[in-house]
DNA sequence: GTATGAAACTTTAAGCTTGAAATATTTTTC
DNA sequence: GAAAAATATTTCAAGCTTAAAGTTTCATAC
């Protein structure tokens, strides 16, 4: 989804198609760079980072379904990633509240420390990778993307 | 890479971090919707669509390495996707030019027809999914993303 | 209290993705 | 022109991803 079907020079909707293609190329370029650095510097992956980032925001823990909803990925997907993080000792499942179907997932002490270090580097990388975007431009772009998102969210 | 590590309210680089998170969430949301529709309506996938889109632009064919460079994915990845497209009769490999290491990959007649249909639907979907973005706004956003991209490309 | 259905999660099969190693071919160097 | 380096591609192992089907537990209705 990086190329797009020969957008004709003009016509209704062509500008949106062009926008979509640019958006996708930008995020894929940055994503590839981040993935490579996460691997090289911390021997981890983007999905693991995503899960840890979500859990870091929720010290009390999250349900599996909260995680998958928040990260925009499927349920089964989260199961696998959390499994691996648990086996690495970075995340823990606690099956304690009344509902025995659910398990509260949270970062371990070790996971929290590890994440803090990775997150600091991550923020630096983003600043570096996006340094051709001025802070002001960044705010405006964010605003536009935000309004797209909030409009979109109510629809499905 | 959809959440991001608790962006502090302010500070240097925070606006860029926020921008990155929005960018990623927007593209993931749209991507998920496209993937679902491609599956439901045409029983195909986003990676297959990407490869076919690239080949549609190059009737004379492309090398595997051209494909992987253009699509921003690894070599081995393209091999697998093309293998499946070949087995479905939508794509053909031609090992004909002087260099016997390379193979020219192109759409078959059937593949070209199939792609044209899917692409028409795809363009409509994008118009629909992005209809909260005005055409004017789309052009401005595209411009900003473009300048990011061209600045970035010279660097690595 | 027991059947019905809903909810939370896991498992499975198929496919996508990467980085690294392997293979085959061409080009360069001496 | 043979050895070495470079290029184009494929193979491989590990992990990510989805949709669909399966399991367990909970809530509702009767």
Image: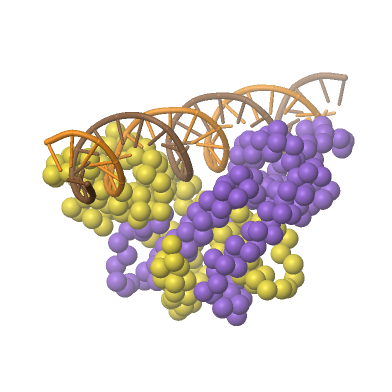
Chain colours: A purple, B yellow, C brown, D orange
A17 and A114: which is toward the camera: A114
Where on the picture, by quarter, is residue A111?
top right
Query: Can residue A129 be seen in the rendering of this structure?
Result: yes
A122 and B36: which is toward the camera: A122
Residue C2, above or below C17: above
Residue B25, above or below A81: below
> Does residue C20 appear left or right of residue A110 in this picture?
left
Query: Can residue B113 be seen in the rendering of this structure?
Result: no
Residue drawn where x is 28% and y is 37% of the image = B86
Residue drawn where x is 62% and y is 45% of the image = A44
> Does residue A136 appear left or right of residue B31 in this picture?
right
Residue drawn where x is 70% and y is 36% of the image = A88
A147 and D3: which is toward the camera: D3
Query: How far across and how far down the image is residue A108, in percent?
Result: 80, 42
Residue A142, above or below D30: below
Q: Quadrant of the C terminus of chain A?
A: bottom right
Residue drawn where x is 71% and y is 73% of the image = B11
Query: How far across and how far down the image is residue A34, in percent?
Result: 55, 55
């Amino acid at each position: 989804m990086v190329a797009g079907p020969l957008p004709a020079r003009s016509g209704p909707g062509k500008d949106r198609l062009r926008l979509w293609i640019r958006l996708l190329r930008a995020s894929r370029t940055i994503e590839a760079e981040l993935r490579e650095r996460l691997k090289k510097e911390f021997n981890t992956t983007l999905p693991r980072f995503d899960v840890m980032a979500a859990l870091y925001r929720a010290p009390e823990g999250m349900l599996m379904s909260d995680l998958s909803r928040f990260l925009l990925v499927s349920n089964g997907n989260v199961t696998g990633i959390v499994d691996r993080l648990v086996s690495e000792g970075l995340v823990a499942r606690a099956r304690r509240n009344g509902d025995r179907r659910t398990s509260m997932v949270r970062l371990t002490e070790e996971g929290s420390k590890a994440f803090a270090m990775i997150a600091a580097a991550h923020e630096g990388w983003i600043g570096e990778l996006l340094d051709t975007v001025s802070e002001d431009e960044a705010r405006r772009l964010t605003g536009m993307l935000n309004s797209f998102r909030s409009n979109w969210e109510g629809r499905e």
